[in-house]
Image (cartoon, rainbow, N blue to C red):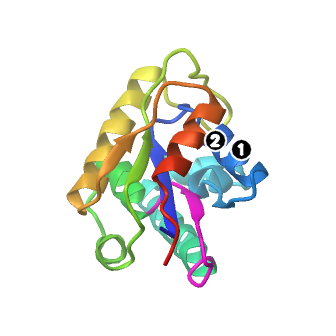
């Protein structure tokens, strides 16, 4: 398995898990949306032009996917193309053909690892503006999108970062 994905609720520990994976020597790809939100004008783009924000996320995911196209793996991505679909559906916007095409033709290796909403660790911050109920709704939308595109979604345990990383490592088969 070369291209593994973390998805799930905002504030469910994905970034900490990605950092631990990188520290263990695994190649990682950071969350595209968070990077966009941290750029000047990123929050305004999300709020004032959610479709434009989604298309910019798509561009970022495409760049990350291509960056690791020939990497022998595994690579752990923080979110992927179907997450853009979940975002658009949360905003009640149509799915552009470019997003649909990416979801159907550029595939990740499964299963997709889902970090479920976890109230004990959830915290809002400058980029994570959803309240907990919105985080749960976002999780439902992105998880449904992954399934719609034919992926198996596996829940990570509500456990320590080390235990979650071991959970992923036990399920990530080497590339042959």
Q: Nearer the viewer, residue 129 or 1?
A: 1
Q: Secondary structure at mark 2?
A: helix
Label 2: which residue? 17
Residue at 44% x, 54% y is 50
Question: With 153 as the anchor, is 22 left or right in this view?
Answer: right
Q: Quadrant of residue 63?
A: bottom right
Q: Are marks 2 and 1 in contact (CB under 8 Å)?
A: yes
The answer to whether residue 167 shows anywhere in this view is yes
Residue 76 on the magenta segment? yes
Residue at 56% x, 59% y is 77
Task: State which region is magenta.
Answer: 68-80
The answer to whether residue 142 shows anywhere in this view is no
Label 1: which residue? 20
- Residue 142 in picture, x, y percent from top left: 35, 47
Q: Quadrant of residue 151?
A: bottom left
Q: Nearer the viewer, residue 81 or 42?
A: 81
- Residue 110 in picture, x, y percent from top left: 38, 60
**Mark 1: few/some/many CA within 10 Å (<14, 14-19, 20+):** some
Residue at 31% x, 78% y is 101
């Amino acid at each position: 398995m070369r291209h593994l994905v973390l998805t799930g609720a905002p504030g469910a520990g994905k970034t900490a898990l990605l950092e631990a994976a990188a520290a263990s020597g695994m190649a990682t790809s950071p969350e595209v949306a968070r990077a966009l939100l941290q750029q000047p004008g990123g929050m305004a783009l999300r709020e004032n032009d959610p479709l434009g924000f989604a298309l910019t996320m798509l561009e970022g995911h495409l760049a990350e996917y291509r960056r690791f196209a020939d990497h022998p793996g595994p690579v752990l991505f923080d979110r992927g193309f179907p997450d853009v679909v979940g975002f658009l559906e949360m905003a009640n916007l149509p799915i552009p053909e470019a997003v649909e095409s990416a979801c159907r033709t550029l595939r990740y290796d499964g299963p997709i690892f889902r970090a479920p909403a976890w109230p004990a660790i959830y915290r809002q911050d400058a980029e994570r503006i959803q309240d907990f109920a919105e985080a749960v709704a976002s999780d439902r939308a992105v998880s449904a999108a992954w399934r719609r595109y034919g992926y198996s979604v596996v829940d990570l345990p509500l456990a320590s970062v080390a235990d979650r990383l071991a959970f992923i490592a036990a399920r990530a088969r080497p590339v042959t």
